[in-house]
Image (cartoon, grey):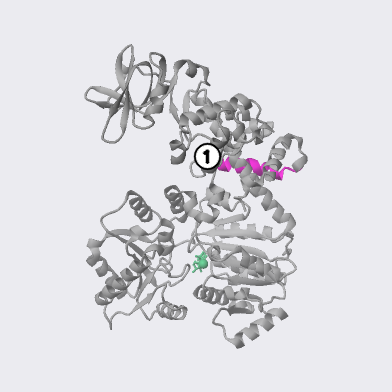
Amino acid sequence: MIFQTSISYLKGVGPSRAQLLGKELGIFTYSDLANFFPFRYIDRTRFYKISELQANSAEVQIVGKITSVKTVKQKRGSRLVAQFGDETGRMELVWFKGVKWIKDSLKMNEPYVIFGKVNYFNGLFTMPHPEMELLKDYKKGFKSAMQPVYRSTETLSNKGISNRVMQKMQQQLFLETKDKYQESLSQAILRQEGLISKNEAMFNVHFPQSQELLTRARYRLKFEELFFIQMQLIVKNLNNKTKNKGFVFDHIGDFFNTFYSKHLPFDLTNAQKKVLKEIRKDVNTGAQMNRLLQGDVGSGKTIVAVLTMLIALDNNYQSAFIAPTEILAQQHFAAVTELLAPMGVNVRLLTGSSSASERRIIHKELEEGSLQILIGTHALFEDKVRFKNLGLAIIDEQHRFGVAQRAKMWMKNKLPPHVLVMTATPIPRTLAMSVYGDLDISVIDELPPGRKAIRTIHRYDSNRLSVFRFIREEIAKGRQVYIVYPLIKESEQLDYKDLMDGYESISREFPLPDYRISIVHGKMKPTDKDYEMQRFVKGETQIMVATTVIEVGVNVPNASLMLIESAERFGLSQLHQLRGRVGRGADQSYCILMTSMKLTKEAKTRLQTMVETNDGFRIAEVDLKLRGPGDLMGTQQSGILNLRIADIVQDSDLLYKARMAAKKIVYAEKGHKDPMYQTTWSSFRQIMKNKSIWSNIS
Ligand code: ADP
Ligand code: MG
């Protein structure tokens, strides 16, 4: 196939350029070059006369002739100056690099089309390093309304592969390949989505014939890119469901029903009910559930976990509930035992600090099957922990658990347990679709009624005294306070010093015996950390000074004030997570963001967003816009977001559309055999075969 031809065979490329293109841009074949899309376009529909130039003109295009050239010596090297004129005036073209080579190649008194930015100085317009082409060649080339600009690198420009050269290569490529693109999407989809053909799109994205065609070309190509990614994720999800057989929980019995009608301490929110329905449907299909449950802090994920575990119990299966830290495991254990107290369910806690005798009981009861719910930390993954019939694993805060660990747990079973991963880190929908598109996702998008919104305030360091006064007032009312310092890896030593200095001054400001302070930071031994945490949880201390190590999900309802120092140094999601530590009790809660006076524009946006909203999803959307998808997900997953033309932030509407369309086809009853979608399926198989393009999707 012509598109697999090595780029070195393209006229005007050759082996050394080919090597450069491969190394710098990953372009090895005709297909790679064709799919190397411009990242912006310049309007070249308009030709200027020299008399029309303005001192602040942007890039302009002019037709004229060179009348003379001279080399001017300067401090270092020399510059080349050409006199250039049209019928309305004259100007100068200037080169500082490649002087000799350019001088030899310039043609006198022949019409050129020049293009570039102009400078104005002492009544004279000059254009440094113009892009230029003889008018007669210009007329021969593909006409474009908009001139494409391709991404380049310094090495490439130094080796003379300018944008103009890249355009020439694209032209040459199109001379050889025009109209040879195979349509990758079925006619039905093209019609339904109003897309232009592949050939038309490929031509117009490189050589736009009009603004409108360019827009349609880009739309078509973005759609296609997103569509096939989504198609792959959806197929993977479907394969999981058919391949990974799971237990069938088809029985809703006494455990669930009794608890639900007699012991539920509150009415479920509609969002909780909706999620529970989704879970009940999943566990009943005979396939393994792999569901991600997203819900902002305090949205009530625990009760959903408990009800799901009761369904497992009704079907005679054990459940495991795993938290990332000891404290969280303890809190889950306390919450679950309290909720299930009237139900006579056997619930136990297993963590690193469980005693040998406790472990013996746990191991024995687990293997016998009399232990119904086991809550704990990583300790649950130990080899000695063997369930009789583990049917459900609930994992809180997935970010801390590797998939490998999850897999290890499944191995102990004949069948893998259903997996429910809960996270309080809101992931914007577009991102969730792209990165977790193969998981099923549930969202609790509503808080339980009667919550008092946390009031967030931004204060400068100069207001410190009044902030301390406010803290004293809150403590006098019996409240507790978090004071958080940044901890950013690169400056760990410095941050540690900040924390210690802060602790000193807080201790002076809030002295014994009236005030007691806990301190927690990353350099402490885990047991000391736990001890300090516990003192705060029990209310023995009123102030907790900490770096960001304060545990995700820690619940101290009496803590109603959070002071974040150097808040400008935190990312949005971190700020939101931290703020979630307060607002858990009946009292009005506050979050005070302390910063210096010097703030970047981005920091201002972050602070303003925090002050304006408590909605984790809105915050995540802003974060996505500020940082881009790669940063947001960490480098691990950013590969999937390396798109050629689409942008999941800017093209989010298109992403939904592409996903819907892909879903429709994957789920179409006749699947592969439906002739209506044959073209699409065969492109899909082709793409899957060229796995290299898709290796970024694990
Ligand atoms: P998170 O989603 O952060 O884990 P939790 O499950 O800890 O949230 O719930 C936060 C608090 O809200 C708990 O005290 C819980 O009892 C309470 N809660 C949960 N659901 C409801 C509801 N539907 N109505 C009232 N209170 C609720
Ligand atoms: Mg929780």
In this picture, is 222 found above or below 561? above
Q: Position of residue 319 (x, y in %)?
A: 65, 71
Q: Which residue is mark 1?
A: 20
Give the image quarter of residue 456.
bottom left
In this picture, is 218 found above or below 276? above
Give the image quarter of residue 363.
bottom right
Q: Is residue 564 left or right of residue 203?
A: left
Quadrant, the N terminus: top right
10 Å crowding of disc 1: few (<14), some (14-19), many (20+): some
Q: Position of residue 685 (x, y in %)?
A: 71, 42
Q: Position of residue 337 (x, y in %)?
A: 57, 77
Q: Is residue 617 left or right of residue 499?
A: right
Residue, far bottom? 357
In this picture, is 537 found above or below 495? below
Amino acid, disc 1: Leu
In this picture, is 627 found above or below 355? above
Q: Relative to the observer, which residue lies in front, 698 or 584?
A: 698
Cβ of disc 1 within 8 Å of ligand 2? no
Q: Which range of residues does the magenta coloring cover?
A: 653-669
Give the image quarter of residue 6.
top right
